[in-house]
Amino acid sequence: MLVRLLRTYLRPYKGQIALLVLLLVGQTIGNLYLPNLNADIVNNGVITGNLHYILTTGEVMLGLTLVIGVFAVVAVYWASRVAMGAGADIRQAVFTKVQTFSARDMNHFGTSSLITRNTNDIQQIQLFLQMALTMMVIAPIMCVGGIVMALHEGAELSTLLLVAVPVMAAFIGVVMVKVVPQFRSMQRKIDRINEVLREQITGVRVIRAFVRNESEADRFAVANKSLTDTSLSVNRIFALALPMMMAILNLSSVAVLWFGGRLVSEGSMPIGNLTAFLTYILQILMSVMMAVMVAILLPRAAASAERVEQVLDTVVVVSDSVNPTEPTDSSGRVEFDHVSFSYPGSERPVVEDLTFVLEPGQTSAIIGGTGSGKTTLLNLIPRFFDATEGHLIVNGVDVRDQRQETLWNSLGLVPQAAYLFSGTVATNLRFGRPEATEEELWKALEIAQARDFVAAMPGGLEAPIDQGGTNVSGGQRQRLSIARALVKRPSVYLFDDCFSALDAATDARLRTALKTEINGASVVIVAQRVSTIMQADRIIVLDDGRVVGIGTHGELLATCPAYREIVVSQLGEDAAA
């Protein structure tokens, strides 16, 4: 998974990676050549007392060191650029993919998991990539080059490498086997922490109202302890691994000095060669340790890449047609032709055999008991879900045959839970039409009965709005959401029970203004209150997912028992007379 992901997203950076590799190769070759020069100084300068040779060779070493330093700085710079760039590209790809998800896809992953995948998981991949672009290039060159140079300096001592390198490699392999599953578990537990924390922040009022602070604190403590225990377990393994690798490194140095010292005393090896050999064996083992440092990051990066790939490889349930059809009609006519919808695994449809037409210039209301399928019906129009049977036609074309963006451009949705974005009143109102003028914004606010309270806010249209609209009341959020849809000027307006937080007088004024100002569009109102929809041109009554009545308020009172029952329960027998 990790290799495939990096192969895809590193392709635009091939030129920078090639330059980076050249710099690292030059840096490593320089580092491998320095011990050889040091051996020459000892053998040909120090032992013979040739000061000129020492100074001349020392100048070469100093110049080479400066070049290596420049190469190292430039290489780290480009490695960071490539790692951060690739990480940004992956993050953008995940974000773009999530934007195409239907409600079913979102529910499959969960909001907290998607946030973790697009932040923490990609951060782990970035960190691994930055280390790999430097150390994983240097390590093999230094290891192989060190072995070659060590053989050149002292073939008799080279047999020590046959012991030290395999022992360290075997130890690393054991560590990897232990930590890979734990890193996967750690990412899942980070998801869980995010999920619990998100629920507690968004549901803080409910938690306090039901005095569940202690139980929620315990629930968070359980998730937190689980993550802590896994993290400690991983860190214990690494806490043992580092001293063990240092022990192997130091024992190898002791062995070189022990056996090399005997060779020097016997006169079969110059002392300069021994110092060079010691440096090379340290370089070899350090290269293995560098590989280990990358290997430490590899399991977590691999687990993170797998989770990111799961998002990117998701086959979106609701997607554009291969050959989309562009509607030639923009009137806003919506036709339900024997439409049914079932959730996966459900025993029966949520809505079944819906057949009716929502005509332009008319206000159509949808009413029914709780769980009758009102919101589900409305969500089928913008394709938040796809109908499992039948055809839903908007502007003369089946919604599955036209591009989603084309469909959405013709719709103005005011959801049941009004949501505002952080910014200002103006940026929220222009969300669907950025070019809207201030005059158009004030007009939409006037229709939505929001002009007065916006004018009273410090800054008016430039008044700040917090994330979610938490600095305004529920009724104000609903009216601003309605104004946002009005500014867009679509051909179909979808109002999903968005008048519930309004008082009766404001509700009446708003509906009167709507009928006057948007009389050329199709208006669909989902409502619980009969008073909200009594004046609608047509009322569609749902009961248990099926249409049981269509008509005006007066017609339904006479012909639809389900509607009459709703009217009586809300307004009394006199209103139904």
Image (cartoon, rainbow, N blue to C red):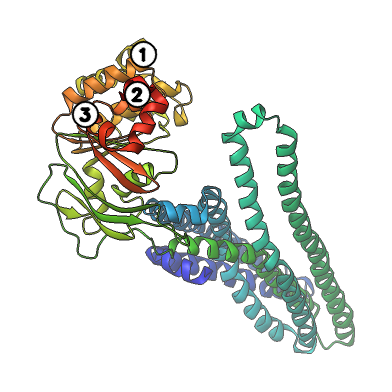
Q: Is residue 30 left or right of residue 385?
A: right
Tag nearer the camera, 3 or 2: 2
Sequence-wise first label, 3 or 2: 3
Read off the residue under disc 2: 479
Q: Is residue 147 visible?
A: yes
**Closest to the observer, 226 or 104:** 104
What is the spatial separation of the Cα atoms under label 3 and label 1, in whole angstroms? 20 Å
Q: Residue lying farthest left?
A: 328
CB within 8 Å, label 1 to label 2: yes
Q: Is residue 500 visible?
A: no
The label number, if any, that marks residue 453 in the structure image: 1
Callout 2 amino acid: Arg
Residue at image position (38%, 60%) is 317
Tag nearer the camera, 1 or 2: 2
Residue 108 place in picture, x, y as percent: 50, 57
Judging from the image, what secondary structure is the residue with disc 1 in? helix
CB within 8 Å, label 3 to label 1: no
Please tell me how crowded label 1 is: few (under 14), some (14-19), or many (20+) other residues with Cα within 10 Å: few
Residue 469 place in picture, x, y as percent: 44, 27
Callout 3 amino acid: Ala
Read off the residue under disc 3: 436
